Image (cartoon, grey):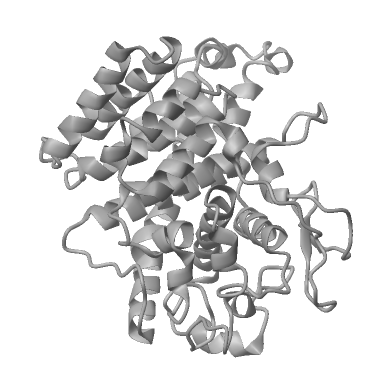
Amino acid sequence: HRLRSDRRFTDLFTTRYQAFKEIQCLGVFHQQLRTQPESKPYLFPFMQVDDQHSALSKLYQQVRTAMLQIHESRGSQAAVDQLLKVAEECISKPKMSKPPHDAMKNIDRRQAFKMLVWLVTYYDFFFPKRTSQPMCLVVGKQLKPYIKDEGVVRLIQSFLHPRWLIENKESPMPLREDAQMLRILPDGRIQRRDHGGKKVDPLYEMFIPSRSGSPRDQSDIDLCHCLANLVGVVLGCQPQSNHLWYHLFSPNELKNTYMTGFMYDSKISPEGLLYDCGVELTAEGQYGRPDYHKHATRGTYSLHSLYFLLWTNFGAFCISLLTQPDSQSKIHGPIISEWQAIRHYCVSQVKTMWSYLRNNLSLSDEEQSFLVTRCLMNMYEVNMNSSTVLHGILRTKEEQDEYETKWHTRIYTPGWNELHCKFDQLINSFTWYIENKRRTR
């Protein structure tokens, strides 16, 4: 069987090693793995400890060091100047000096700077609960001319100072009694749930859990990490160059266009069909309506790549609702039906697609995080390729078909292939060591 988790592999030969210590040949694994860093499959390659030579990795370390120094020095001018120096270099020299073999050779440093500021904000400030008023002020003042976009500034500041995140409690009950509501059970199964209940904000609680004292599930943490990576990729690409930029910062412009993942041959329109009417899947993750089959058999994507596509679409909507003050009015009604409990609906879709990916592809949590993050990295690389034309707004059916085909063939499929290569290496290395020991006896 394929070994499917670095975490479980490490745990097996460290904390649970007592059950195997009599097997002498396993001792070397115990010695090596007990000092091995925690597996973090959700990190982009340039954020990994073993990737310190790529141009993007070096820029990431510069941004990270400067931002942490601003926080630790409480906003000293010397620390601020260091970050501004990095920003100025990215503006004045937008193209990286890179070796020919560097996969990131087409990166625009101006956009990469925004992406890296965001990733440091999330992983080094928000996730470890490190609120930083000095860094928040720097983003809103000194960095604003480099970031330029008000929505991006608001996004980053909200995660540096989480009190700025938008909480909007609502009843989970849709206004239509026949509306389907799904919930995720602890074992990953999906089940219909009854309507009703007190007003809550599941979107806010997904990132800011209530203080119940119980530890967060690792799968929920990985989900939030991957949503942060999704935001990072959107910021790293040119504005308006892929459809997720509109989901995140300008969802009202999606009205009267063809939207990815929508399985009817029509545009999204309040006078016609809205987005939630054309993305319904069954509790088992199959196509929910017979009318969808025409779209499904065109060959633009598989059911599995559709899960990932819809996860990104609703994930971007979630971050938009959480950070952009006017987002709800731009989504609720013009794009998604008014009778939906919008925040419950978007979170439900994100978690449901997340579960479909894990359950229907038989993935471990770790494999899932790796797959999603590598697919996002593929999206970034495709967007950076000057020979590739991606339309952020899809005006025609032909543009939608072309976009979804690229999504499957150049973003999802390479990620799926890389997943198998990565995790097969674990069991291969283990098997090689055991066989080698047998031969030398």
**Number of on-image labels:** 0
Dividing the picture into quadrants, the one containing residue 24 is top right
Residue at image coords 33%, 33%: 46
On screen, residue 81 above or below 425: above
Q: Residue at x 26, y 39 (%)?
A: 146
Identify the image quadrant of the N terminus: top right
**Residue 27's x, y, as percent?**
57, 11
Q: In the image, 33: left or right of 378?
A: right
Residue 290 locus on image (x, y percent): 65, 89
Give the residue at x 23% y 53%: 384
Q: Observer-nearest residue: 429 or 413?
A: 413
Residue furthest to the front: 141
Drawn side of residue 179 relative to residue 132, left or right: right
Question: Residue placed at 82% from the left, 65% from the top?
Answer: 173
Left or right of residue 193, residue 154 in this image: left
Q: Position of residue 125 (x, y in %)?
A: 51, 26
| Residue 427 visible, this orientation | no
Query: Is residue 36 shown to the viewer in this render?
Result: yes
Q: In this rendering, is residue 177 above or below 382? A: below
Q: Quadrant of residue 30?
A: top right
| Viewer-nearest residue: 21 or 16 | 16
Please provide percent x and percent y for residue 356: 64, 60
